[in-house]
Each structure stands twice: as structure tokens, then as C-alpha cells.
Image (cartoon, rainbow, N blue to C red):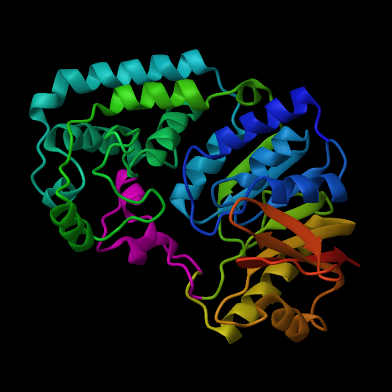
Amino acid sequence: MLKEKEFLDKKELIQINSISSYLAMFPVSVPLDLIKKYSTENDLIMDNFSGRGTTAISSRFLNRRFVGNDLNPYSYVLSKFKISKLCKNRIFLKLRKLEREYENIKDEISTNGFEEMLIYYSEYTLKQLIFLRNRIGKQWKTNGKYINAILAFALGLMHGPERKNGETIYFSVSMSNMISMSPNYVENYKQKHNLKTKEINIFKKLKNRIETKFFDLLTKEYNSSFKYHDSLKPLNFVKDNSVNLVITSPPYLSIVDYTKSNWIKLWLLGYDRKNVSKEIKLKDKLKMNEYIEFIKSYLNNIYPKLKTGSKVCLVVGDVYNTNLIEETWQEIKEEVNYEKIDLIIQEVSENKKSLRSMNSKKGKATQVEKILILKKE
């Protein structure tokens, strides 16, 4: 049972991790359990498909070092935020400076060319977002850690639902906070439910969000690194024989299109809806044979980076009524130098997620993800 301080610290960890939603994300309980089981303090944890940085922030929470990468700009911003040593007051100083810059030029900002975005935002709000997009969004790869933190918080507020009383923490008309819906869908939904865009001051919303989601864990020095990098290319930023544990969730066949599903957030980073899938090349549209080859190539690519005996935990959901990870392992096990240790089920019920071995008694779950545990031989 968690002690009171541990319980409160874990609540803060969950709050930090929830600054922005992310498709196919796993909860902090998954990496926390695996890190505790398969590593010790100061070990190096790696995640090569970092997503919103759940493994990164969990490693930080448990005093492990971290190295990771991803090819999604959205993931880059979130993961970089979760490994940075930050001061809340300095974030506020940067935000106030941005707000003053906006006030000085707001009359010069035009929404021409962004008519589609007026479906989601009032003109008053969209002008602020255009400023943020041009000033810091398009520079997502080179921003300093404090501007990156502001961008990470902004991404989490780009769209989401109103409360029943009409209040909202988000910038947009009331909609899902998980998926960037298409303009036609949102326009029809607005008309059907008589929804209107509101004059939202994004700087005020950002101040409130930072105030409620910034905790002491982010102020501590942290030994970590994160790269915008393809996981099938040489991982030159990771030393050979240095990684103690890998926890990662590779893309699942063609079940999720991360670029189209996040196009509004990616718009803030300088991308346009119609071209985003062409500009950002993610390996999330694979057929079964391609997926098997992808996983084999990935495991072989990370192999030199792992210490002998290190564990690799692959979190993979069952899709299309197939035992995806089991079938994949059967196809590749003779071509990779890993030993299978376990296959764990992550049960998703209405109110919690839990892990159990495949060998234990099965419970009633509404959704199932599986975690293949491998060991470097």
C-alpha cells in the first residue's frame, strides 16, 4: 500500500502526464510497474516511440535515467517538456513576454487564409493562436526548454469539451480533446447542437493550466536526452551496452493515423491539415507482413544498445481480432537474439487499468493490450 507522500507524489505525476491527451497512450501505472520490476535506481530506461512521454516522466519519478526518441513533432514537444528541469516563475516570465509581443502587433495579424480554423475558434482567439504558431510553434524543434514548456501546455488546450455549465479550459468550440475532428464534422455538430465559438484569451488559459499542472518533479535535475529520430535508423545518440530496460509502444498496424488524428495540434506547430500526412512520415499504416518486418528490424536495431540480460517491454494492442504480438513473435523469434520472458495482459475496465501475467486467471475486461517481455541473450 502506498504511503501518504508516495500517494500524493503519484497524483502529481499523473497530473503532469495529463497535460495533453495522446492516442493509444498507456497510463503511468504500466511503466511504473515495469520499471520497478525490471530495473533499479539510476538505470537507463529507453523509449523509442515516446508518444506523450509517459515512460519518460515515469522514469524521472522513479529516479532512473532516460533516453528516447520519436518522429512525431507533437511527441517531441511533450516528451522534451517531461524531461526538462524547469522553474515555474521563468515559464510565467516567458509567457508574459509573449503576451506583450502579441499586444504590440495584434492589429497587424490577419486570419485570412485560416478560414477553416474559424470553425473551431473565434476570430479573437484565432489571432492569438496564429501569433503563437508563427512565433514559437513553427520553431518546435529549436525552441529553448521554457518556450517548449509553453508550447506543450498550449498543445494540450487546443481543443476539448465544455463543462455542463458552459465553462471550458480549452481554446476551441466544445469538441473531443482526443481527436482533431474534420472541419465538416465540427461544422455540422455545431449547427446540430447550436454551439458557438467563444472569445477565449489563450494567455489567461495557459496561466491557469500551468498553475494547476506544474509540480516539484519538474524542478529537479534530470539525467536524460530526447531526439527527433527514426527508430529504425542508427541510434548514434545512445551508447552501446548502456540501456537497462526498454518500455515502448510501437505503432499498431494501420489502426491509428497519428498525423490526421492530431492535425489541429500539428497546425499549431506549423503544419497544414491537407499536407500533414505527406510532411510527417510515421510508420503507422503497416500491413501485417510489414508490421512483422518492422518489429524485427526495430529489435535488431536496438540490440547493440542493450546490456546483456536487459529487458524489452513491447506494449501492443490486439487489433482486427488477431493475437498481434503473439503472431509477430512466432514469426521473428528465430531471427532475433532475444528470449521471451512473459506476455502480460493490460486489462482496461471502466475505472482502472491493471497488469497481469497471461498465465494468471483472466478477468472481465472491456479492452485488452498485451506487453511482450523479452530479454537480450
| Closer-to-camera residue (344/354) | 354
User: In the rendered view of the protein, which quadrant contains the N terminus?
Assistant: top right
Report the magenta residues as a range.
Answer: 254-283
Nearest the camera: 367 or 17? Answer: 367
Which residue does the image show at 31% across and 51% down from the upper left? Answer: 264
Q: Is residue 9 above or below residue 66?
A: above
**Lateral position of residue 131 relative to residue 290, left or right:** left
Rendered view: 350 above or below 296: above
Residue 334 seen? yes
Q: Quadrant of residue 231?
A: bottom right
- Which quadrant, please, contains the C terminus? bottom right
- Residue at 49% x, 24% y is 212
Decide if residue 205 is on the left or right side of residue 144: left
Residue 270, position as x, y percentages in the image: 30, 47
Task: Please state if 154 lies on the left or on the right of 50 as rendered.
Answer: left
Taking 86 as reference, is 55 above or below it? below
Query: Is the residue 155 above or below the residue 144 in the image?
Result: below
Q: Quadrant of residue 369?
A: bottom right
Can the viewer see residue 143 in this picture?
Answer: no
Q: Nearer the viewer, residue 77 or 8?
A: 8
Q: Is residue 97 magenta?
A: no
Residue at screen point 78% across, 33% down = 63
* Image position, residue 302 (x, y; %): 73, 62
Residue 87 spot, x, y in % from top left:
54, 17
Residue located at (57% from left, 39% from top):
17
